[in-house]
Image (tube, helix red, strand yellow):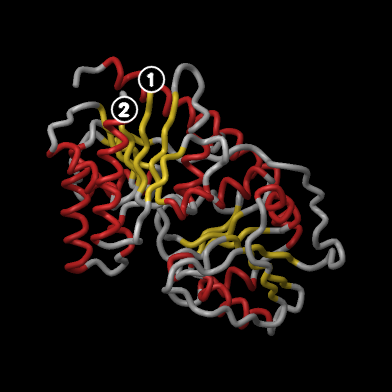
């Protein structure tokens, strides 16, 4: 069977997802329609159909719709798989054109979750994405919190849960990147320096607590991608390393005492299972999917973004306690977050849609 993937964006978590599900096996072949400047985020072996896009906005949406229709005519897919919010408009265009073949939609984090305070904007986004989702044959939710949001908001369509996962450790890990300071507590942040990821909150809290605790270190991996991030002003004890290659990132996880994920919203958070596969505990905010991924006092800690809870959490960290979580973190990865489980569920979904009437 041939699966045609439609992507208005293919960076970050979406790119990781596409790379993972390309290897379903069996008689499945995949073709990926992505913006030309996002194609480099995908593995070289993927069968990509890049298209020119002027970026997000009406012109970018129209370019995605045109590329979608061209790819459908050229590839004659059995199933069309739409990824992320703006691809819903391509799905609508396909349905308006009379195409009734099986279609899957995955938001990779519902857009409504971005509007933390509710209000009119959130309501409008819920009406739009919740209505258009009903045009899909199946709607994949990547986390329990996304599925709960869809149900609570009465989003249309048959919704299922296929929780995200990641491949096992890539490359060798020494766990000794920070061996020059063996007694320090080494904290790691991995991700975009954008408002969603909450790095500004972490730096502010770390700067305050760092004046009291001289044994804390903060290693920041990543850079800004969107325009809503703030410039990083490093406090004492913090360092900035930019993006790290996939071949090297596991050594950063393995060498750290804990990963900190201070996101304001999060559809899933792939950095959590990436940390767990290396036995690294996770200290995360109580937003979105994150608290459902971390078991307090077993695989990490969960803090509230309200008040000074993050500061209190950093202040209370104990190196020996964190090291005691490592076996449980690896066990959590093996039980819940493997790529094999994700591929199996997606493969089963494809088979069920091929057997179902249009």
- Residue 291 visible in the picture: no
Total numbered labels placed on residues in the image: 2
Q: Nearer the viewer, residue 124 or 279?
A: 124
Is the residue under label 1 in contact with that under label 2 (CB below 8 Å)? yes
- Residue 256 visible in the picture: yes
- Residue 1 circle label: 1
Give the side of residue 116 with respect to residue 93, left or right: right
Give the side of residue 58 with respect to residue 250, left or right: left
- Residue at 43 percent of width and 24 percent of height: 347
> How many neighbours does mark 1 have within 10 angstroms: few (below 14), some (14-19), or many (20 or more)?
few
Q: Quadrant of residue 172?
A: top right
Quadrant placement of the C terminus: top left
> How many neighbours does mark 2 have within 10 angstroms: few (below 14), some (14-19), or many (20 or more)?
many
Q: Is residue 264 above or below residue 110?
A: below
Residue holding disc 2: 79
Rendered location of residue 6, percent (x, y): 34, 41
Which numbered disc flags the more N-terminal residue, 2 or 1? 1
Rendered location of residue 4, percent (x, y): 36, 33
Find numbered disc 1 in the image and state the secondary structure of the residue it sits on.
loop
Q: Is residue 95 above or below residue 349?
A: below
Rendered location of residue 354, percent (x, y): 30, 18
Q: Is residue 281 above or below residue 170?
A: below
Give the side of residue 41 with respect to residue 259, left or right: left
């Amino acid at each position: 069977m041939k699966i045609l993937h439609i992507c208005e964006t293919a960076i970050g978590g979406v790119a990781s997802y596409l790379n993972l599900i390309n290897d379903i096996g069996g008689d499945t072949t995949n073709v990926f329609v992505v913006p030309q400047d996002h194609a480099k985020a995908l593995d070289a072996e993927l069968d990509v159909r890049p298209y020119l896009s002027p970026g997000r906005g009406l012109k970018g949406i129209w370019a995605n719709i045109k590329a979608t229709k061209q790819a459908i005519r050229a590839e004659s897919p059995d199933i069309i798989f739409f990824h992320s919010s703006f691809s819903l408009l391509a799905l609508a265009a396909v349905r308006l054109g009379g195409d009734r073949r099986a279609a899957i939609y995955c938001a990779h984090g519902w857009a409504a979750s971005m509007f933390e305070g509710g209000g009119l904007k959130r309501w409008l986004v819920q009406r739009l994405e919740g209505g258009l989702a009903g045009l899909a044959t199946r709607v994949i939710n990547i986390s329990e919190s996304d599925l709960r949001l869809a149900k609570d908001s009465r989003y249309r369509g048959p919704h299922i849960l296929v929780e995200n996962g990641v491949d096992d450790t890539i490359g060798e890990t020494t766990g000794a990147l920070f061996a020059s300071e063996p007694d320090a507590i080494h904290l790691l942040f991995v991700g975009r320096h954008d408002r969603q990821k909450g790095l500004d909150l972490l730096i502010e809290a770390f700067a305050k607590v760092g004046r009291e605790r001289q044994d804390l270190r903060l290693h920041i991996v990543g850079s800004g991608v969107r325009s809503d991030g703030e410039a990083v002003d490093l406090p004492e004890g913090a360092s900035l390393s930019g993006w790290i290659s996939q071949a090297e990132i596991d050594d950063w996880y393995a060498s750290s005492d804990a990963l900190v994920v201070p996101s304001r919203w999060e559809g899933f958070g792939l950095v959590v299972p990436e940390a767990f596969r290396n036995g690294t505990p996770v200290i995360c905010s109580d937003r979105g999917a994150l608290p459902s991924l971390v078991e307090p006092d077993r695989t990490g800690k969960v803090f509230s973004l309200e008040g000074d809870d993050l500061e209190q959490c950093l202040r209370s960290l104990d190196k020996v306690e964190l090291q005691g979580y490592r076996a449980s973190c690896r066990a959590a990865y093996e039980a819940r977050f493997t790529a094999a489980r994700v591929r199996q569920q997606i493969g089963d979904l494809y088979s069920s849609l091929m057997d179902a009437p249009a």
